[in-house]
Image (cartoon, rainbow, N blue to C red):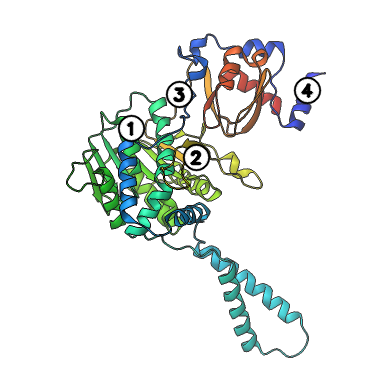
């Protein structure tokens, strides 16, 4: 087969197959240390996933005590309903979109009415059309409502979401812990802190360095429950994690910054794109190193995070307090448009984490938390070292005999389906691929990437 014929074949299949003896030789890394850094293949630098996560023992004990003491009626059923409601939650329809839809419907109804013969009472017709448009909008528009948590609803939320929320945040934070091992944050800001899972997850990563943790949540009952969890459900006891401060509003001064700022499952609770944009810009002003955003692994969660990404990469504030620009740290290996948004139908970019739920009736089996996340940094984009870039695995890895199917988001902003073999891509890359899974990173040799791009032109 000629090289031109081969290129055509690869375009038609949509599967990236890097073949040819010359390419195989060029693709070999100069040494194993180029990207393995002395680690075995199963622990290569791109392995970021965690095994099954469990809540810290003290947190689990405190949560069980609070739930038992609360004696909430029909708790298992209510916990399932709340989980399903939060998972299916959509963004509120923006006023401009609603107005455009109303105008379009009204125009269509007028055109139909005018096509009919006979006299028309325009005033009566106008009234009928307006009532029909309003009725149709009420029927078809998603009715977004603010979530309000009293103490009982907070306990239901604890039973349904404490362990899953902790698992998602802990996995997201592991990106920083694994890829930036010198990072030792002294201060943390958690916006929309809820039950304080971010504090517990951050403490499990950086207990030795964290000296100040500020939790901001507008819900007084949620703040009380979070404090009870920290005290092991004993009001007379000292907090299990010290230097945690609860507030109902963000610190006012724009000059006060925190090493680590987190907003987990919070942006989706804001009513419109303007408020989400303002919140993201405020949080970024308060970030001195890393901003971590976590949402449900749904289309809505992914879209909300991509809104935030665009805001911080493209919008310029009038007053700049910290001139260091935002760079994407994870999960994207690039700062181009998310290629998943270009797919039809749209598929969310999400990841999953196994976790052990609270040991409550019907909650004994291991569960999977599916989530989306975004981490931005002020330290600039990650540099390529040893001629190696890193792609992100965005789907489960399919391991076959002597080859591995990897679906990746690549540094060039493209989604690629790569069939990795030892002969074509080197033994090291092949063994790393077999040891990796959805959410991990995989090394992409620069020369290999250039050849791949030329094959698809």
**Quick check: marks 3 and 4 in contact, CB under 8 Å?**
no
- Horizontal side of 241 relative to 170 (left or right) equals left
Sequence order check: which comes first, mark 4 or mark 1?
4
Sequence order check: which comes first, mark 3 or mark 4?
4
Sequence order check: which comes first, mark 3 or mark 1?
1
Q: Which mark is residue 61?
A: none
Measured in 3D between alpha carbons, the distance from the residue under mark 2 to the one under mark 3, in whole angstroms, is: 41 Å
Q: Which mark is residue 365?
A: 2
Quarter of image, res 284: top left
Which quadrant is the C terminus positioned in?
A: top right
Residue at (65, 48) in percent of width and height: 345
Quarter of image, res 19: top right
Is the residue marked by circle 4 packed among few (<14), some (14-19), or many (20+) residues within 10 Å?
few
Sequence order check: which comes first, mark 2 or mark 3?
2
Disc 4 marks which residue? Answer: 6
Disc 3 marks which residue? Answer: 383
Measured in 3D between alpha carbons, the distance from the residue under mark 2 to the one under mark 1, in whole angstroms, is: 23 Å
- Horizontal side of 398 relative to 178 (left or right) equals right
**Quick check: marks 4 and 1 in contact, CB under 8 Å?**
no
Which quadrant is the N terminus positioned in?
A: top right
Would you say residue 320 is visible in this rendering? no
Which label lies toward us, 2 or 3? 2
Disc 1 marks which residue? Answer: 204
Sequence order check: which comes first, mark 2 or mark 4?
4
């Amino acid at each position: 087969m000629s090289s031109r014929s081969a290129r055509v074949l690869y375009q038609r299949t949509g599967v990236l197959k890097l073949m040819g003896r010359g390419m195989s030789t060029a693709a070999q890394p100069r040494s194993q240390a180029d990207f393995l850094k002395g680690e075995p293949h199963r622990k290569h630098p791109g392995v970021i996933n965690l095994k099954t996560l469990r809540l810290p023992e003290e947190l689990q004990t405190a949560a069980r005590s609070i739930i038992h003491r609360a004696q909430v009626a029909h708790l298992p059923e209510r916990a399932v309903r709340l989980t399903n409601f939060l998972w299916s939650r959509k963004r509120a329809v923006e006023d401009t979109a609603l107005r455009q839809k109303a105008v379009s419907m009204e125009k269509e109804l007028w055109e139909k009415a005018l096509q009919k013969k006979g006299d028309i009472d325009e005033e009566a017709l106008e009234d009928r059309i307006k009532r029909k448009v309003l009725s149709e909008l009420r029927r078809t528009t998603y009715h977004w409502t603010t979530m309000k948590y009293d103490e009982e609803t907070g306990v239901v939320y604890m039973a349904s979401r404490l362990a899953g929320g902790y698992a998602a945040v802990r996995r997201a934070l592991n990106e920083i812990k694994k890829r930036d091992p010198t990072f030792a944050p002294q201060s943390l800001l958690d916006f929309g802190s809820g039950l304080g899972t971010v504090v517990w997850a951050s403490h499990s990563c950086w207990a030795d360095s964290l000296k100040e943790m500020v939790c901001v949540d507008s819900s007084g009952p949620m703040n009380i429950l979070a404090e009870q969890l920290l005290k092991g459900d004993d009001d007379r006891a000292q907090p299990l994690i010290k230097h945690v401060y609860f507030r109902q509003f963000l610190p006012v001064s724009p000059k006060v910054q925190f090493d680590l700022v987190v907003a987990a499952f919070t942006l989706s609770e804001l009513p419109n794109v303007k408020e989400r944009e303002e919140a993201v810009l405020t949080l970024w002003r308060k970030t001195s190193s890393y901003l971590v955003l976590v949402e449900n692994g749904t289309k809505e969660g992914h879209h909300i995070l991509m809104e935030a990404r665009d805001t911080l990469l493209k919008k310029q504030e009038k007053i700049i307090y910290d001139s260091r620009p935002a760079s994407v740290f994870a999960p994207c290996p690039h700062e181009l448009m998310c290629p998943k948004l270009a797919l039809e139908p749209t598929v969310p970019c999400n990841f999953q984490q196994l976790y052990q739920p609270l040991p409550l009736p019907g909650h004994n089996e291991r569960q999977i938390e599916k989530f989306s996340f975004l981490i931005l940094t002020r330290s600039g984009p990650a540099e390529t070292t040893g001629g190696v870039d890193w792609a992100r695995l965005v789907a489960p890895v399919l391991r076959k005999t002597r080859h591995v199917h990897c679906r990746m988001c690549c540094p060039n902003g493209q989604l690629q389906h790569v069939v990795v073999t030892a002969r074509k891509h080197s033994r090291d890359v092949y063994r790393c691929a077999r040891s990796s899974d959805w959410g991990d990173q995989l090394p992409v040799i620069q020369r290999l990437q250039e050849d791949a791009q030329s094959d698809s032109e």
